[in-house]
Amino acid sequence: MSKLRTFFALDSADKFASLEAMVLVLYAKLLIGKVPPRRWRSRFGAVARSSEKSGDLETVRRVRLAIMRALNNVPGAPNCLPQALAGRWMLERRGIASSLFLGTQRDETGKARFHAWLKVGDEWVTGLCDEAQYTLLVPGEPETA
């Protein structure tokens, strides 16, 4: 089935979420390219140490799937940070608190590798990983809606 046919087969909420995700992922990628990392915390919102709150599970899953669809349809293969930011903004618009995590780990050669992930409570939105393998950067408190 073609991408367009697949898109038109979605319900209206999924269509909107998919288009919103594509725009926000591209916007986040542009901001990351233009805003120095030292300004990420103030520009992109608080970074969390833990996830405490939960939201409407159906909406959280809709946002996660919309982000996944966007990744298949936007240029430049956006990495984990634009995905997490787009997901956070989408959830925020829907009144759902989320926790954004930024972590680092060393690869086999000792080089630092960074990763961002987003969760609502225990539910993963983007960046599924083994959290125990990462040292959190810029710890803070979860945002509340």
Image: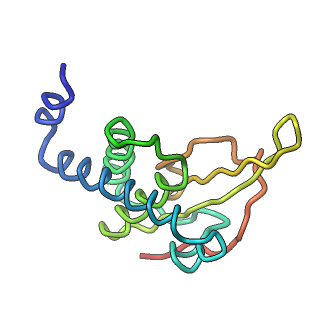
Q: Is residue 135 left or right of residue 38?
A: right
Q: Position of residue 34 (x, y in %)?
A: 51, 68
Q: Quadrant of the C terminus?
A: bottom left
Name the outermost residue toward the bottom.
42
Location of residue 47 with respect to 128 vertically, above or below: below
Q: Position of residue 67 (x, y in %)?
A: 37, 46
Location of residue 117 with respect to 6 vertically, above or below: below
Q: Position of residue 108 (x, y in %)?
A: 86, 34
- Residue drawn at (41%, 57%) of the image: 87
Location of residue 27 with respect to 131 vertically, above or below: below
Q: Is residue 33 left or right of residue 7?
A: right
Taking depth in this image into account, of 55 and 34 the one nearest to the observer is 34
Q: Quadrant of the N terminus?
A: top left
Q: Is residue 116 left or right of residue 27?
A: right
- Residue drawn at (36%, 35%) of the image: 72
Callout count: 0
Q: Position of residue 82 (x, y in %)?
A: 48, 55
Name the outermost residue toward the front.
34
Quarter of the image where one finds residue 51: bottom right
- Residue drawn at (54%, 71%) of the image: 35
Q: How is the image coloured?
A: rainbow
Quarter of the image where one finds residue 128: top right
- Residue drawn at (39%, 65%) of the image: 89
